[in-house]
Each structure stands twice: as C-alpha cells, then as structure tokens.
C-alpha cells in the first residue's frame, strides 16, 4: 500500500486568530509553487491542517520539497481508508508491515474527531493494538518510547493512518509578514539574513549593486545563483540589479578616500529605499553583524543609517561568523558565496576606511555633489529579474507567476 496523501500541521500559524485564513492562503501558495513540477498533486487546505493529495506522485519526492517550506510544523505521509473496522484493520496491517522491522516496539495513538464513530479513543488503541499484536510476530508494546507510533485518526469523511512524523522547517509562511528588500551582496552573510527573514514570514525582494566593468558577469551570476537558492524557499525571488558604476566613480572623485565607503553605503541605502517605496515594501534587510568589518561598527551604522527612517532589519547582528557559516552551509548558499569573484565594495574599498565616521563630516563631504539625479537614474535603470527554482540566468520579467 502506498501513501496517498501528506498531512501537514501548521504549528505557530494556528495560534494567529483572525489572521489565520491569510496565513493558510500564504502557506498554500508556498506549497503550490514549490511542488509545481508535480502536476498531479493537489492541495486541500482546511482551517487547522492541510493535505497534499498525491494522485500517484512520489511521496518521498514531495516530502523532500516540503521540508524547506516555512509555516509547517510537522507533516506525516498518510493512508486514507473508509471508516469501517475491516478496511481500517487491513490498512493498519499493510502500513505496519512496510515500516516495521523485527523486534521493534509500537503503540497506537487513536484520535476520534468524529464522535459518532463506534469506538472511542481508548477503544481504538486497544482494538488496533490487539489486532497488530496478533498478526505481527515478535511485536512488543511500549507506550512511553515506541519505535513506531501508529496514529489512527477518525474524522467525519474518513479515517487516516500514519506512522511517521517529520519535522517541518517551522517559522511562518513566506509573505504572511509583509514585504522587505534584501540588500544582497555576493558574500556569505546577506543570503543567510534573507533566509532568516523569510523564516519569519517576510516576502523578500533582493537588491544587488553591480559595477561593470569593475565587477564581472560572473559576480552577477553568483547573485543570481544565490537568489535561486532562496527561491526554493518561497517559490520565486525578485532580484533588482542596480547599475552602480557611475555613482561609485563619482564618489571616488568627490569624497576623501577614508569616507568613500561611508558615502557608498549611504547611497546604496537611499537607492534601496527608493526601490522599496516603488515596490511597496516596509523594511530593508542587510547581512550586517556587529563589529565584523569597518562598515559594521555602531558608529558606522549610526552614520549610514541617517539617510532613512525605514526599519532596517539585521537578522545577523549578534551572530558570530562561525554560526553564520554553519547556517550558510545548511541552506547551501555557502559554496556559491565563496566563489572568488569580486563585488562592487571590494573593488572600491579604500586602504583605511573610517571605522568611526561622523555624520557632520560625511554630510559636509557629500554637500559638494548633487547625488539626487544619479540616484534617480540608477533606480530607473535597475533591471528586474524573476528567479525561479531551477531556472537561473533567465529574465522573465512580467511573466505570470503561477
Ligand atoms: P556579506 O557577507 O553579506 O557580503 P559582509 O560581511 O561582506 O556581508 P559588507 O561587505 O560590509 O559585509 O556588507 C554589509 C551588508 O551590506 C551586506 O550584508 C549586504 O546586506 C549589503 N551589501 C554589501 N554589498 C552589497 C552589494 N554589492 N549589493 C547589495 N548589498 C550589498
Ligand atoms: Mg560582502
């Protein structure tokens, strides 16, 4: 007997009261996108659980995809049977025979959601427990710590049997917390910051500053590949590529060298904020971690942050590099991030950037140049790519996303 559906438990979202239907819709959409290449599978969403009906698609493959979706607490592949005792016995034995190996212990956990069913919870446990003990040789009961916990749930429409409980990725469904712009470099940190933000339900659009010919096509490809990894979590990723060469050259002409980095960051932030406004986001995410490099001292953040009131989310701010790397390895962005291609900030990095840049000073240095038209031009010439899992390098702007 094969599994014919996967039961999905929501976890945290079910505590969200009136917002629940929005959460359920977002989760359903995430699942739909991530299993789009299993066309026979159908999703049934209810208030407190969801099913993926497999219709012949491989349970194992679909489970592989579900593991990365935020908003799922746990899931169980399940068999659906009619609610008569004979059908349920046959289904229980068949499922059990597939999972059980000699000498293992078990218990039955019944649940009677349909109160009109002939056995109550205790009776379900005893009836099916006894039946399995008679029919499976060398089987022992262990109610505390069983190897197999056969769950039998009797609901109105049918009975469901499952024996595996697989832990989901947790978090909240992508999009259920609103939208933010992720400043995505080619480095190790910012993809991790994006991942953690998505975990708390943010829909993320990436913004990358590109300075050809100082930064190469391969540096851009790196960011496309990173975006693709993030697309596996939410179904797709919008990536804005900002042409930054002219601005960087202007900064280097106009601003004293030890303040170029500060001004560069301030202008990147202004551009990202304008893109955020145009695409209706409510926050900006960076991969900053306190004290890691010159731009990430508190003084530096204070001076850079002056250019906007928009909330800046820094999910990695208190994390050590080794912990960030562990996460990057786990989400498979690390091997992309360590490709050696330069990004715009490494090319133009001054020999000794100020670690304690002052607001008054940077304001003064910037006052000799009108950056506004350059910023406007960069925003207008920003290229938008929609990255889907498995299709990096393609621009499909304007395509209907599912
Ligand atoms: P990362 O590993 O994310 O590159 P980092 O430790 O190298 O971070 P910085 O280079 O100081 O730190 O960058 C700090 C943050 O600024 C990055 O995490 C990212 O959010 C943003 N950033 C830096 N360079 C770019 C870029 N070229 N395009 C977009 N955002 C960038
Ligand atoms: Mg970097």
Image (spheres, grey):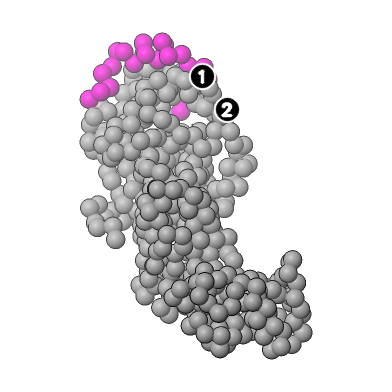
Q: Residue at x 65, y 81 (%)?
A: 127
Residue 255 in sight from this viewpoint: yes
Magenta-colored span: 349-373
Q: CA distance from mark 1 to mark 2?
A: 10 Å
- SS of the residue under disc 2: loop
Q: Residue at x 50, y 75 (%)?
A: 116
> Compared to 319, does 121 lie above or below?
below
Q: Residue at x 51, y 40 (%)?
A: 189
For disc 1, the marked residue is: 299
Residue 213 in sight from this viewpoint: no
> Compared to 293, does 151 lie above or below?
below
Quadrant holding the C terminus? bottom left
Left or right: residue 114 versus residue 215 is right
> Compared to 53, does 305 lie above or below?
above
Q: Residue at x 29, y 34 (%)?
A: 277
Residue 194: x %, y % from top left:
46, 44
Residue 21: x %, y % from top left:
38, 54
> Compared to 322, does 89 lie above or below?
below
Of residues 377 and 171, the one drawn nearer to the viewer in this rendering: 171
Determine contact: label 1, label 2, CB under 8 Å: no
Badge 2 crowding class, 10 Å Cα cut-off, few under 14, some 14 to 19, many 20 or more, is some
Of residues 103 and 364, the one drawn nearer to the viewer in this rendering: 103
Q: Earlier in the sequence, mark 1 or mark 2?
A: 2
- SS of the residue under disc 1: helix
Residue 350: say if magenta.
yes
Magenta stretch prevailing secondary structure: loop
Of residues 175 and 373, the one drawn nearer to the viewer in this rendering: 175
Residue 27: x %, y % from top left:
41, 56
For disc 2, the marked residue is: 291
């Amino acid at each position: 007997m094969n599994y014919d559906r996967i039961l999905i438990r929501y976890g945290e979202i079910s505590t969200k009261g009136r917002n629940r239907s929005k959460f359920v819709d977002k989760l359903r959409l995430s699942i739909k996108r991530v299993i789009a290449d299993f066309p026979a599978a159908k999703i049934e969403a209810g208030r407190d659980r969801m099913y993926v009906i497999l219709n012949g698609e491989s349970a194992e493959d679909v489970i592989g995809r579900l593991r990365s979706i935020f908003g799922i607490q746990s899931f169980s592949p399940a068999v659906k049977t009619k609610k008569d005792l004979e059908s349920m016995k046959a289904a229980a034995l068949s499922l059990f025979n597939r999972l059980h190996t000699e000498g293992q212990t078990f218990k039955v956990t019944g649940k009677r959601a349909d109160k009109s069913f002939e056995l109550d919870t205790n009776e379900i446990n005893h009836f099916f427990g006894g039946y399995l003990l008679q029919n499976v040789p060398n089987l022992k009961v262990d109610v505390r710590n069983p190897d197999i916990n056969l769950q039998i749930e009797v609901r109105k429409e049918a009975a469901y049997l499952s024996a595996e409980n697989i832990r989901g990725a947790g978090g909240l469904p992508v999009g259920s917390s609103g939208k933010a712009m992720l400043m995505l470099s080619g480095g190790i940190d910012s993809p991790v910051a994006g991942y953690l933000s998505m975990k708390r339900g943010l829909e993320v659009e990436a913004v990358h500053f590109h300075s050809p010919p100082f930064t190469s096509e391969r540096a851009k490809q790196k960011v496309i590949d990173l975006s693709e990894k993030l697309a596996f979590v939410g179904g797709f990723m919008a990536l804005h590529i900002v042409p930054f060469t002219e601005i960087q050259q202007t900064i280097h002409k106009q601003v004293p060298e030890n303040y170029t980095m500060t001004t560069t960051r301030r202008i990147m932030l202004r551009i990202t904020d304008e893109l955020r406004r145009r695409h209706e986001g409510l926050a900006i995410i960076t991969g900053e971690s306190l004290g890691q490099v010159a731009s990430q001292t508190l003084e530096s953040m204070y001076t850079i942050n002056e250019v906007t009131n928009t909330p800046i989310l820094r999910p990695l701010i208190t994390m050590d590099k080794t912990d960030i790397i562990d996460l990057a390895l786990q989400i498979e962005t690390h091997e992309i991030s360590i490709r050696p291609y330069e990004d715009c900030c490494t090319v133009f990095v001054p020999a000794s950037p100020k670690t304690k840049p002052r607001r008054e000073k940077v304001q003064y240095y910037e006052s000799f140049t009108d950056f506004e038209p350059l910023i406007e031009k960069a925003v207008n010439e920003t290229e938008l790519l929609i990255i889907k899992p498995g299709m990096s390098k393609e621009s499909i702007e304007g395509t209907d996303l599912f």
